[in-house]
Amino acid sequence: MRLIKYLLFFAFLAASSSNVVGQNQTIGFFESDYILEQIPEYEGIQQQLDLLSRQWREEIRRLESEIQELEEDYEAKEILYTEEIRNQRKQEISQKKQAKERYAEQKFGPEGEYFTRQRSLLEPIQRQLFAAVRTVAQRQGIDFVFDRSGDIYLVYANNQYNLNDEILEQLGIEGDSE
């Protein structure tokens, strides 16, 4: 989906630059990773997140160790157990594995505590960064600014190139002009 958006955007750039006579769009880029590394508060946030991550990973390792001990104990004593005790031990091992998976998901899953905490800690810095990008772009007359750290993201676009209303009109839909 992201690739489609990029292709549409670059097709728009090509079409708009050939259709707009005498008007050149300027494009700039920056590297958010580099900028963030220069912001003093960012290092402290990274240290907080690393500490939390280490603590949670250690807990996961502890749970994995408990599971391994249970499995080894089961294998060593399996022939001594009745069918009922075997089933109980297997269920105990299964429950312990599920608990470890739930814990890992709770801490590191897409909606987990790590990413929630990361988002809340970094949000003020990111807002500050994007405001600075917008100010610099407007001051220098730049129409489009991309972040080229990792995936390339469009971070700023001059609103005069916003085609939402025209596209909605072409589709026969009344838009919410802002």
Image (cartoon, rainbow, N blue to C red):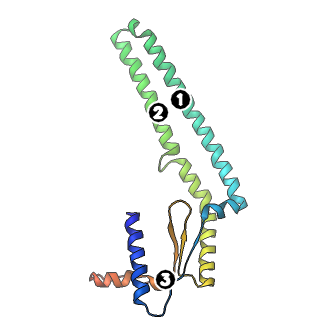
Residue on which the image places disc 2: 99
**Callout 3 amino acid:** Asn
SS under mark 1: helix
Q: Badge 2: few (under 14), some or many (20 or more) residues near its Cα, within 10 Å?
A: some
SS under mark 2: helix
Which numbered disc, 1 or 2, marks the residue that appears first in the sequence?
1
For residue 52, the mark is: none
* Residue 6 placement (x, y as % from top left): 42, 69
Q: Quadrant of the N terminus?
A: bottom left
* Residue 28 placement (x, y as % from top left): 57, 76
**Residue 176 visible to the viewer:** no
Q: Badge 1: few (under 14), some or many (20 or more) residues near its Cα, within 10 Å?
A: some
Compute the Cα span from label 2 to label 3.
49 Å
The answer to which quarter of the image holds residue 16 is bottom left
For residue 63, the mark is: 1
**Residue 112 visible to the viewer:** yes
